[in-house]
Amino acid sequence: MTGATPPNEPVGSRFREFQAGLDKPDGHRRRGRDGEQLTVPPADFTAYYGRPVLKPPVWKYDIAGYLFTGGLAAGSALIGAGAQLTGRPDLRKVGRWTALGGVAASTYLLVHDLGRPARFHHMLRVAKLTSPMSVGTWILAAFGPLAGVAAVAELAPLLPQHGVLGLARRLALPVGNAAGLAAAATAPALATYTGVLLADTAVPSWHEAYPSLPFVFAGSALAAASGIGLIAAPATQTAPLRRLALAAATVEFAGGHRLERMGLTGEPYVRGRSGRLVKAGRVLLAVGTAAALVSRRSRLLAAISGAALVASSVATRFGVFEAGRVSARDPKYTVVPQRERLAEKSTTRL
């Protein structure tokens, strides 16, 4: 048996050899006759006996894209409904088609990350209100068909005016309007649930940001949707989008400011690659909002503003995603806050 004491060697000699190994520095600890290490390797700050302190997220960058496209779809549905209620048909079309494109891309990215389409179907077999993933799957499943019906209804003018297709043409408008309003009703949940989903994990920079992430994602969703509207809709119908971009920037800046003030776990939002992405998102958001406010009837300024707003949303989503990955890989973001909480509890008890 490996490690057994030879028949002619006293037990005490093996014990003294083990004690001598304890007194050696980490790099010079003695080994037994069979090459076995006589002491357990010390747990250091990067691993717990060879295992990571926190298992990093298995999500790929598909999920970062999913965060962006889902928010874009939600914001566009709200814009489409607002345009419907205020008599802006061209802006309504842009909002509805963008909502459908966004939710289609979002669904594809989610299924691609899951690996098999059947896994998305299996997630719909249960409804668990305490699980953000389960709730989000049902929100996406409800929003998608509604956005699809609202968008397809925009094709009604292409149908003939008589016969069965003529009847479909006449029914398309009221059905599309109802579906557009219903999609807008579910849009706020679609825009913000991903923030709740990230905060519900054990990843430090996501978990500690639970009060702020939904607001950051809501502002980002409205900014991206406003950007698409400024690019694609006529300038005569985009006045509400300029005000919406300002509101979106206010919400996102307030939430982003809180992310940076979280202490140690907020560090990935201001440093490294993730910090550069978040900062780029804020700069682009400021540029896009300022350009939107002065664009008025200028198609060039509207296009510049819209592109900056869309790019800001992409940078923000990918920056937040990367910040979580950074905090999961570095154990200090898990260990140091735990020690601080333990020290605070000890002080309180005293």
Image: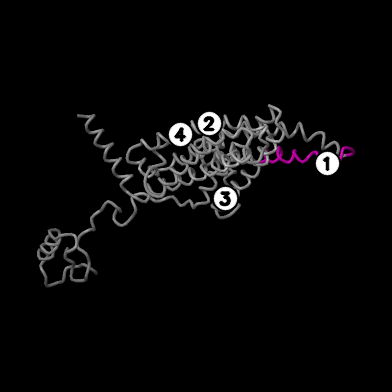
Marks 1/3 in contact by CB < 8 Å: the verdict is no
Which residue lies at the image location 35% right of the left edge and 41% below the top edge?
265
Is residue 149 rendered magenta in the image? yes
Of pointers 4 and 1, the one earlier in the residue sequence? 1
What's the distance in space between the residues labelled 2 and 1, CA to CA? 39 Å
Q: Which amino acid does label 1 sit on?
A: Leu
Horizontal side, residue 180 vs residue 114: left or right: right
Q: Which mark is residue 253?
A: 4
Q: Within the image, what quadrant is residue 299 found in?
A: top right
Q: In this view, does 14 lie above or below 272?
A: below
Quadrant in the picture for the N terminus: bottom left
What's the distance in space between the residues labelled 2 and 4, CA to CA? 10 Å
Which residue lies at the image location 27% right of the left edge and 51% below the top edge?
45
Q: In this view, does 41 lie above or below 348?
A: below
Observer-side mark, 2 or 1, equals: 2
Residue that numbered label 1 is attached to: 159
Observer-side mark, 2 or 3, equals: 2
Of pointers 4 and 3, the one earlier in the residue sequence? 3
Report the magenta residues as a range: 144-163
